[in-house]
Amino acid sequence: MSSSDVRDVVIIGSGPAGLTAAIYTARASLEPLVIEGEPSSTSDQPGGQLMLTTEVENFPGFPEGIMGPELMMNFRAQAARFGAEIITEKVTRVDFSSRPFGVWIGDPDAAEPTFRSRSIIVSTGAQSLMLGLEDEHRLIGHGVSTCATCDGFFFRDQHIAVVGGGDSAIEEATFLSKFAASVTIIHRRDELRASKIMQDRAFANEKISFMWDSVVTGLQGETSLQGVEVEHLPTGERTVHPFTGLFVAIGHKPNTDLFAGQLDMHPNGYLDTVPGTSRTNVDGVFACGDVQDSTYRQAITAAGSGCMAAIDAERWLEAQH
Ligand code: FAD
């Protein structure tokens, strides 16, 4: 491999963060390579999480809203227009122990990496943990959601449910109670894991009620959610409830397995970045989007941090000369 085979920037992931980083680095003449993932599983989805949804109403610049997949096709076309190279592959291994960094696609045991790069932008995103029900992926964006901030507005005056018992479930339920006619929290135990202050807020909220010791066992509806089947664990009794919205709030998993032992992570698996920057603990490796953000998890914040990573990488590369 000659030094001309060494890229300036390889971007891993093609959600709003990765493709924004691609637009910026391409316009800075860094000829980025974007490894966008493969359409094979939920963690690995070219275009990222917005490919799983329907209407996006909160991305600035689209006063009438835009469909998630269309928005991501626009991001991709914009990156390609400035010369970003985009390949539909999955990264199977990285080596950040020496520079230039190594990136493998295909056989992770291959002796030589597929690509070498002076800098890397990690934008592999995160996934919402799901219930594992047959119909939930079909009904995502059609009544089933994993994001109250994104979708709460669509459920005005409806009877909806939230699954989960931790802080984020209670936060989502409290937020949703501003829009919905009622919010039922379905929780597998008989007490919440959420902090006391969150619990008190939920118990005091007249719109919020609870189904304890219960799990969701089925979803009904052809084109949109019309009913939710719930099993009461102590009795095994199953009942169907006419909820038209179901928010799954049982946690998120950042896609960071690939970087274990190489990049510093928070105990929850999210990558650590130096506050106010996209820098990781490895010089020349930058991270942006949901893979390093367990707080905001929005397309616009992911895109914003993708811009930060591109500028950080560009300046870092410049300083190496
Ligand atoms: P992601 O979008 O998660 O993209 C990750 C990318 O990494 C993917 O391209 C994937 O293929 C790639 N990848 C992962 N592993 C590998 C690998 N090993 N090799 C190569 N590539 C890899 N936000 C809003 O602002 N508004 C909304 O209305 C909204 N609605 C949503 C609806 C749903 C159903 C969901 C799930 C999320 C929604 N969000 C919404 C949140 C938003 O989608 C995310 O915050 C945003 O997509 C995060 O962008 P990202 O680029 O960090 O990561």
Image (cartoon, rainbow, N blue to C red):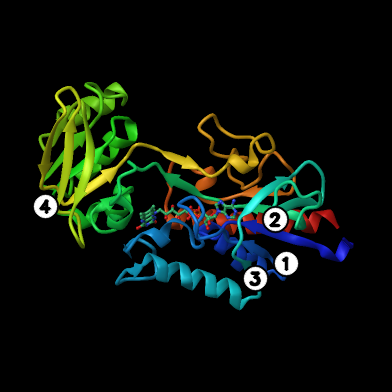
Marks 1 and 2, how far apart in space? 10 Å
Residue 30: image tag: 1
Secondary structure category for the residue under label 4: loop
> In which quarter of the view is residue 263 placed?
top right
The residue carrying pointer 1 sits among few (fewer than 14), some (14 to 19) or many (20 or more) residues within 10 Å by Cα, namely many
First reached walking from the N terminus: tag 2 or tag 4: 4
Residue kind at label 4, given as amino acid type: Asp
Marks 2 & 4, CB-CB < 8 Å contact: no
First of labels 4, 3 by sequence position: 3
Q: Name which residue lies at 69% across and 59% down.
A: 10
- Residue at x 76% of width, y 61% of height: 8
Q: Which residue is mark 4?
A: 157
Q: Which mark is residue 313?
A: 2
Mark toward the start of the polypeptide (3 vs 1): 1
Q: Dot 3 corresponds to which residue?
A: 84
Q: Residue at x 56, y 32 (%)?
A: 266
What residue type is disc 2 on? Ala
Q: Earlier in the sequence, mark 1 or mark 2?
A: 1
